[in-house]
Amino acid sequence: MKKYFIFLSIMCLVLTLKAQNQTYAEKLGFPKGAKVVIMHVDDVGMSYDSNVGAIRAVEEGVATSMSVMMPCSWVPGFVHYLKNHPQIDAGLHLTLTSEWKDYRWGPLAGKPTVPNLVDSEGAMWRSVEETAKHASADEIEKEIRSQLERARAMGFEPTHMDSHMGTLFARQDYLERYFKVGIENKIPVMFPGGHDTMIMRDGAAGLTLEQAQKIGKMLWDAGLPVLDDLHNISYGWTMDKVKNPDEKALQKYKTQKYIESFKDLQAGVTMVIMHCTSPTEVFEHISDSGNTRRGDMLAMIDPALKKYIQENGIILTTWRELKQRRDKVK
């Protein structure tokens, strides 16, 4: 009898360790060891150029998902497109900053409702640090809800939510409100709660691995899918030494950077963040990031990147698919 209980104890320990070592991809029913990737475009709705770049990246390339900045001017243009293409995986790029010099936006909740989220120009603060210094968690939650409300009023039900400039990760109480709204509305929230290999190595997590995994478990137990890792380094891949790089040279440069970085992908679900834009002559008056954004778009439509993904067995997915899979897991 004693041996039987020892055996049971060992089996329980083995099963516990196995469960701990499982990636969230495996828990969602993907093959063991699979590298599953969401190719995600940020900043949709910010400008006409942003909409065109995101749409090209999905329709002509390997991008699979995107998220929309609800306070921005070109949101209606994208939502009109979305109504004609309901299969597109589109979420909310929860926007709590307004970073550019001459092109700016204010909170959808309105200044009287969220006075500390607004600067002297009547727009949101330019930096994450300024927002974190001034705005309360209550104001952050009110603005998150206002952005979700606008989307739904327009007939746009988001597949997920994430954070523009990572503002929601700047304070623990902001993060808690982000999770609260996601769980309450059963909308997946971008959060790397798995092995976090890339995001920890790049020093952009803001949390310890133990903290991140504890949050990941909480979100999973609440019925939401969880990321194993986050790839958030492409914005720094620029050709700034070349003022107007040749399109083919820019495409080759960006594609190679993605391929090189993908060699570090580990098993599990990884969200790859990019900013695909097709800059017109107006975009340079918004931002000086036109090269890196155009490069992202060109990389997504590059046959060489598609070939690499296929040849290396990388599985592309969407937030919609992750939620559907999560709903089937008991």
Image (spheres, helix red, strand yellow):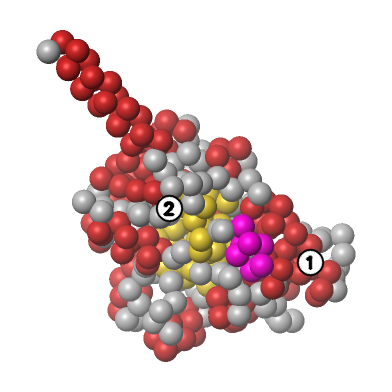
Q: Quadrant of residue 109?
A: bottom left
Q: Residue at x 51, y 61 (%)?
A: 315
What secondary structure prevails in the magenta region? helix
- x%, y% of residue 135? 42, 50
Magenta range: 306-312
Q: Is residue 7 above or below residue 64?
A: above
Residue 133 in sight here: no
Where is mark 1, residue-wise? 252
- x%, y% of residue 259? 69, 57
Q: Residue at x 70, y 72 (%)?
A: 302
Foreground mark, 2 or 1, reads 2
- x%, y% of residue 86? 39, 82
Could you say whether the residue bearing mark 1 is in a helix, strand or loop?
A: helix
Residue 31 is tagged as: 2
Left or right, 64 with reference to 203: left
Q: Is residue 278 above or below residue 208?
A: below
Q: Residue at x 33, y 36 (%)?
A: 19
Q: Is residue 33 above or below residue 75?
A: above
Mark 1 and mark 2 in contact (Cβ < 8 Å)?
no
The reply to whether the magenta stretch includes residue 14 is: no
Q: Residue at x 37, y 67 (%)?
A: 320
Q: Pick whichever, 211 or 70, lies toward us.
A: 211
What's under tag 2, amino acid-wise?
Pro
Q: Quadrant of residue 92?
A: bottom left
What's under tag 1, amino acid-wise?
Lys
